[in-house]
């Protein structure tokens, strides 16, 4: 069956995740994240596009062999997976918001 790689189907890390594969020589034949699966130029590697939040669970359960997703999603999911590398993109911004009528002020 080969290797199945899970990538986010949309969002801020979807494009950079595809670029990482291309730089590694794993180009997509059909570069459309509208499909669930995309074949690569290596017949042993298939890419699975899914919600970024689901990727840790798919890797944990063996539906994907490896995945690229946000570290925050791995932690939130609590999936027992090994983080292999920080790819240094898709950093999360944390903001605090309150209604203007709130007693909280900046």
Image: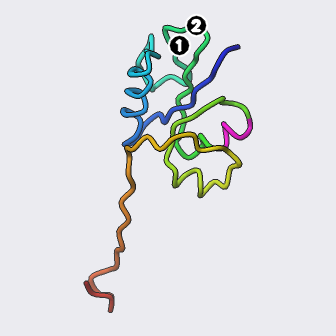
As drawn, 76 above or below 66: below
Query: Which corner quadrant holds the N terminus?
Result: top right
Query: Can you tell which of label 2 and label 1 is closer to the viewer?
Result: 2
Is residue 105 located in the magenta-colored stretch of the structure? no
Q: In this view, does 20 lie to the left or right of 99?
A: right
Give residue 31's position: percent from left, percent from top: 41, 18
Q: Which residue is drawn at 54% across and 34% down?
A: 50
Q: What element carries label 1?
A: strand
Neighbourhood count class around disc 1 (C-alpha, 10 Å): few under 14, some 14–19, many 20 upward: some
Q: Which mark is residue 43?
A: 2
Residue at the front extreme, as displayed: 85
Nearer-the-camera pick, 52 or 78: 78
* 104 w.r.t. 64: above or below: below
Horizontal side of residue 102 vs 67, given as left or right: left
Task: Kindly identify the residue that appears in the image at 59 percent across and 58 percent down.
Answer: 76
Task: Single out the residue that lies furthest toward the right.
Answer: 61
Q: Are marks 2 and 1 in contact (CB under 8 Å)?
A: yes
Coordinates of residue 94 in the picture (x, y in percent): 38, 65
Q: Which colour scheme is used?
A: rainbow
Q: Name the dominant secondary structure of the magenta segment.
A: helix
Numbered mark located on residue 80 in the image: none
**Which residue sits at x=74%, y=38%?**
61
Locate the C terminus and report the quarter of the image it occupies.
bottom left
Q: Residue 39 carries which label?
A: 1
Magenta-drawn segment = 57-61
Which residue is rendered at x = 39% and y = 56% of the image?
Answer: 92
- Real-space CA distance between mark 2 and mark 1, rounded to the nearest whole angstrom: 7 Å
x, y percent for residue 45: 58, 15
Q: Quadrant of residue 97?
A: bottom left
Q: Circle 2 — which element?
A: loop
């Amino acid at each position: 069956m080969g290797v199945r790689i899970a990538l986010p189907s949309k969002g801020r890390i979807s494009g950079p995740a595809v670029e990482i594969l291309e730089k590694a020589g794993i180009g997509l034949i059909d570069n459309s994240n509208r499909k669930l699966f995309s074949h690569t130029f290596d017949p042993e590697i298939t890419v699975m596009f899914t919600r970024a939040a689901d990727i840790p669970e798919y890797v944990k359960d063996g539906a994907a062999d490896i995945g690229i997703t946000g570290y925050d999603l791995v932690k939130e999911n609590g999936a027992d997976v090994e983080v292999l590398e920080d790819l240094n993109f898709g950093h999360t911004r944390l903001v605090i918001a309150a209604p203007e009528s709130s007693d909280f002020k900046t």
